[in-house]
Amino acid sequence: MSELVTGEAVALELRPARLPSRALAVLLDLAVAVAVYIAVTIALVASTASLDMAAQTALSIAGFVLVLVGGPIAVETLSHGRSLGKMACGLRVVRDDGGPIRFRHALVRGLIGVIEILMTFGVVACIASLVSARGRRLGDVFAGTLVVRERVPVASAGFMPPPPPWLAGRFSGLDLSAVPDELWLAVRQYLTRMGQLDARVGWAMAERLAADVAARTGAPVPREVPPPAYLSAVLQERQAREARRAFGGAAAGGDPAATAPPLPPVTPVAPVTPAPPTPSSTAVPPAAPSDGRPGTGKGTGTGFVPPA
């Protein structure tokens, strides 16, 4: 991984292309250029048969320069660093600061490439790429360019850490309606990639995002809350509100009583008048008071009456 610094002092992490992929791209470009050169040569021979030998030689040299030198320069200039071979291998030529190349960069690379690729059969270019830390050949060194990989393996989605438990419900009273979706997306992307960022760069980015969110909500960031924890807690509060709005309070961890279905009405029952007691020859003594001890027959709560 190579770190480039743009003119705006932004650090970019790019993957420099190595010798095997660059060699394959050059071979594809040369195959296409040679095929075009052969076709142009046949057309020139057929159309200049009536000319003398000197004119035919001059036209052949001009065709060679235009096809094998001017062609790659024009293609890289118009495509901003992507020739046919580089497109097939997922490569691109960029400036040292990560920006797109211009005509002067492609011109220097093309002219030096004639010497280190065509005249030496790529030996000089291979040695320079192996010696360079970023795999640059001599044309890249003199032009101030770098060949990078555009197609990189897709990384798995980053893990977004939850806020600390002591911040649960801390920002439930914030007004989040003025925070735009673009800022929420930036906060989410930062939280998922904060583990991959440099410590100072990540902290500065968290402070800037926290200040932007606080300015939209109208409430400052608490002094005792770190900016990353503040962003995580506010984002979780926003997600909880969206869940409550979509699925209801109980589904989002709210009050179940607020969303519980109402109970059916209770039908009043007429009071029942107790029947008068009937005389009995045997009086039943009252139950003994409970002492809470099992096995004594007293107060066991079973409804049985102890013997008289």
Image: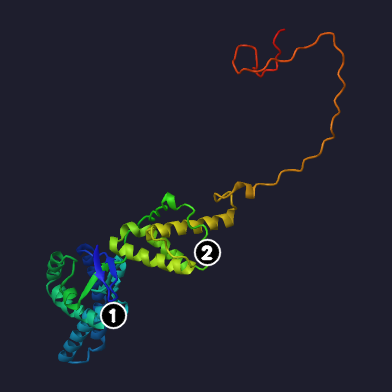
Q: Earlier in the sequence, mark 2 or mark 1?
A: 1
Secondary structure of the residue carrying tag 2 is loop
> How many numbered tags mark residues here?
2
Decide: marks 2, 1 in contact (CB < 8 A)?
no
How far across and how far down the image is residue 193, in percent?
35, 59
Give the structural element (helix, strand or loop) at label 1: helix
The N terminus is located in which quarter? bottom left
In the image, taking residue 41 as reference, residue 204 lies left or right, namely: right
Tell me the crowding category of disc 2: few under 14, some 14 to 19, or many 20 or more residues within 10 angstroms, Cα based.
Answer: few
- Between 172 and 104, the residue placed more toward the observer is 172
Q: Is residue 65 left or right of residue 284?
A: left
Dot in front, 2 or 1: 2
Q: Which residue is found at the position 22% from the left and 91% from the top?
A: 50
Res 225 → quadrant:
bottom left
Tag of residue 215: none
**Residue situated in front as seen by the camera: 45 or 121:** 121
* Callout 2 amino acid: Asp
Q: Is residue 303 above or below residue 205?
A: above
Estimate the spatial distance between the alpha carbons at disc 2 and disc 1, rounded to whole Å: 51 Å
Estimate the x, y position of residue 182 in percent, counting from the top left: 46, 68
Residue nearest the viewer, comparing 262 with 286: 286
Q: Residues within 10 Å of mark 1 (few under 14, many from 20)?
A: many
Mark 1: amino acid: Thr
Locate the C terminus and report the quarter of the image it occupies: top right
Give the residue pinned by disc 1.
Answer: 77
The x and y percentages for residue 266 are 77, 40
Residue 71 visible in the current orientation:
yes
Residue 119 horizontal side relative to residue 25, left or right: left
Task: Kindly identify which residue carries mark 2.
Answer: 175
